[in-house]
Amino acid sequence: MIAVGADARVRLWAGTSAEQVLTSSSNTFTDLFDGVDVTVSAASADPVTIGVTVDAEARTKASADFIAAVKDILTRIDNGSKATVAANQGDKTTLGVFTGDSTVRSLRSALADAIQHPVDGVSPSSIGISTDMYGVLSFDEEKFAEALAKDPDAVAGLFSDVASRVQDTAKVYSDKYDGLLTSRITGQESEVKSLGEQMERWDVRLAQRKANLERTYARLEVMLSQLQSQSTYLSSQVAALSTSSSGK
């Protein structure tokens, strides 16, 4: 017996004005609800209730990973901005790759503000996001989990706003067309290119100057040789005159 295949079907909110039927070519309905995938295993005419709960552990880990990524950026900027001043005479002062770079310094400040400034009067520290007196970012997973258990919607909203501010800051600085860092890099590349062109022009000028000096030196050598010949001739004439006068 051959059975004709058919798409899997689920009926949502059956018997209500919101009733709708969804189909899937497989037994899995992707994103049936926001962030929820459902796989059916057997046909059933009886209503099935689907319960969805917040995975607090997964949320906490995802939030911790996000803060860790921002902290890594801030740490890289801090390390690249350090300068080691020579302690003794003869020692060298070592500058970081970002030392004195106002654009990177501004990025660091903007990211820190996006993370730590209150949202509608609520401090991110209330959900475990804090910065110490040295500007080091930290995330208290236990405090975040406790806040999430008490009011998941409020925590989600606060963290979402913080993440949005970080995203907006990142876009302002890293947009591939008009980001501040992009413009900074483009400007430096143009400056390097300009310096390279100036060096090439100087190479041409120096080569021309060298050729002119070599020609001048060659003429001077010829003139010197002529003067030496004249000097020798004159010396011989003077010697001849002296000999003639002595004989007389």
Image (cartoon, helix red, strand yellow):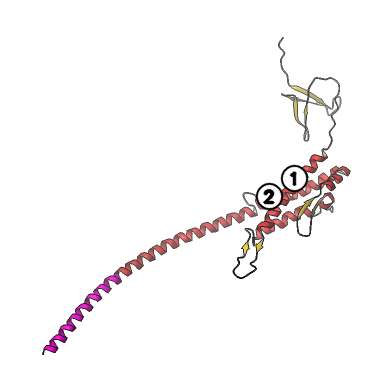
The C terminus lies in quadrant: bottom left
User: In the rendering, at what x and y percent does residue 33 appear?
Assistant: 79, 33
Tag of residue 164: none
The residue positioned 64% from the left and 58% from the top of the image is 98
Instruction: Say if 224 sits above or below 54 in the image.
Output: below
Question: Is disc 2 surrounded by few (<14), some (14 to 19) or many (20+) residues within 10 Å?
Answer: some
Q: How many labels does the image show?
A: 2
Tag of residue 171: 2
241 in magenta:
yes
Q: In which quarter of the image is residue 99?
A: bottom right
Instruction: Say if 18 sits above or below 192 in the image.
Output: above
The amino acid beneath tag 2 is Lys
Label 2 vs label 1, nearer the camera: 1
Q: Give the range drawn in magenta.
A: 219-248
Residues at marks 2 and 1, CA–CA distance in whole angstroms: 20 Å
Q: Which of marks 2 and 1 is nearer the N terminus?
A: 1
Q: Mark 1 points at which residue?
A: 65
User: In the rendering, at what x and y percent does residue 88 appear?
Assistant: 63, 69
Nearer to the camera, 116 or 99: 99
104 in magenta:
no
Instruction: Say if 178 sits above or below 206 in the image.
Output: above
Q: Do the residues labelled 2 and 1 touch (CB within 8 Å)?
A: no
